[in-house]
Image (cartoon, grey):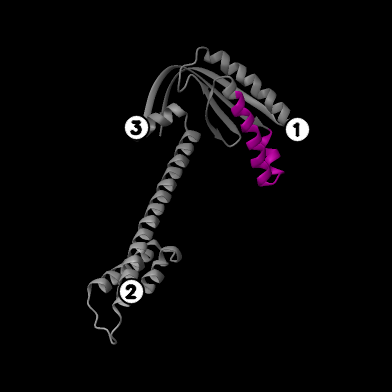
């Protein structure tokens, strides 16, 4: 019984799961063999002692079996929780990269999506003066400036019903009318453009830099897809 109990500690002390279960399985087999194979004692033992020893064997085997079940259930729950966490992380990443409606469609059609849309307004903006500013600042500070700028741009786009498509260096691309129709896309995009300029001017004053935002708008049919 003591050998079986000690070997059962492998469930808690061995790091590699395969080795852990192998050690416990061998210990369990040894205990069962001990219960079934007759052993000739060297000395005659009182019946009470033999009975107590057998009861101890059975009790230890049962306890270790219960321990095996408990640990197995705990490992199963832990694996399930890890799988759910990974799934949630993948979902969050997908929804961070794509609009929610597009992400949902892509989950059911992994081969890709393509739509022809008749009325979309595209907003393209880039930071004038950013290149010389970036050349004179550390890389970490350049990234921090872009993060501050695009965080504000995201808020402006969301407030006016635009969907951010992507950032390209110091450029920002957003649309009105994708993936869902917009009742007045051109007006919303124009209002967003003015708000983006104001946000850039405010950021430029905060940084003490000479940043200017150049914005272009175009309205018409587009082909949109996930490549």
User: Is 25 placed left or right of 186 in the picture?
Assistant: left
Specify which label sits upstream in the sequence, 1 or 2: 2
Residue 88 x/y as whole percent:
45, 40
Magenta range: 129-156
Labelled disc at residue 206: 1
Residue labelled with disc 3: 108
Specify which label sits upstream in the sequence, 3 or 1: 3
**Residue at x 67%, y 38% (from the top left corner):** 145
Looking at the rendered structure, the secondary structure element under dot 3 is: helix
Residue labelled with disc 2: 53
Residue at mark 1 to residue at mark 2: CA–CA distance:
82 Å
Between circles 3 and 2, the one closer to the viewer is: 2
Q: Is residue 197 above or below residue 20?
A: above
User: Badge 2: how crowded within 10 Å, few (<14), some, or many (20+)?
Assistant: few
Residue at mark 3 to residue at mark 1: CA–CA distance:
45 Å
Report if residue 132 lies within the magenta region: yes
Q: Is residue 69 above or below residue 192?
A: below
**Residue at x 27%, y 84% (from the top left corner):** 41
């Amino acid at each position: 019984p003591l050998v079986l109990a000690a070997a059962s500690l492998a469930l808690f002390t061995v790091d590699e799961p395969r080795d852990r279960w192998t050690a416990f399985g061998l210990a369990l087999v040894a205990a069962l063999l001990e219960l079934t194979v007759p052993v000739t004692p060297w000395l005659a033992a009182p019946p009470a002692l033999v009975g107590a020893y057998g009861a101890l064997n059975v009790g230890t085997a049962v306890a270790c079996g219960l321990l095996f079940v408990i640990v197995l259930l705990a490992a199963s729950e832990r694996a399930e929780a890890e799988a759910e966490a990974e799934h949630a992380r993948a979902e969050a990443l997908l929804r961070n990269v794509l609009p929610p409606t597009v992400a949902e469609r892509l989950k059911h059609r992994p081969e890709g999506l393509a739509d022809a849309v008749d009325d979309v307004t595209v907003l393209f903006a880039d930071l004038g003066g950013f290149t010389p500013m970036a050349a004179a600042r550390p890389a970490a500070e350049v990234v921090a400036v872009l993060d501050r700028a695009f965080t504000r741009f995201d808020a402006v786009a969301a407030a006016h019903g635009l969907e951010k498509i992507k950032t390209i260096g110091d450029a920002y691309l957003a649309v009105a009318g994708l993936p869902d129709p917009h009742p007045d896309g051109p007006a919303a995009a124009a209002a967003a453009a003015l708000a983006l300029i104001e946000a850039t001017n405010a950021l430029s004053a905060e940084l003490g830099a000479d940043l200017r935002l150049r914005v272009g708008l175009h309205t018409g049919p587009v082909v949109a897809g996930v490549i």
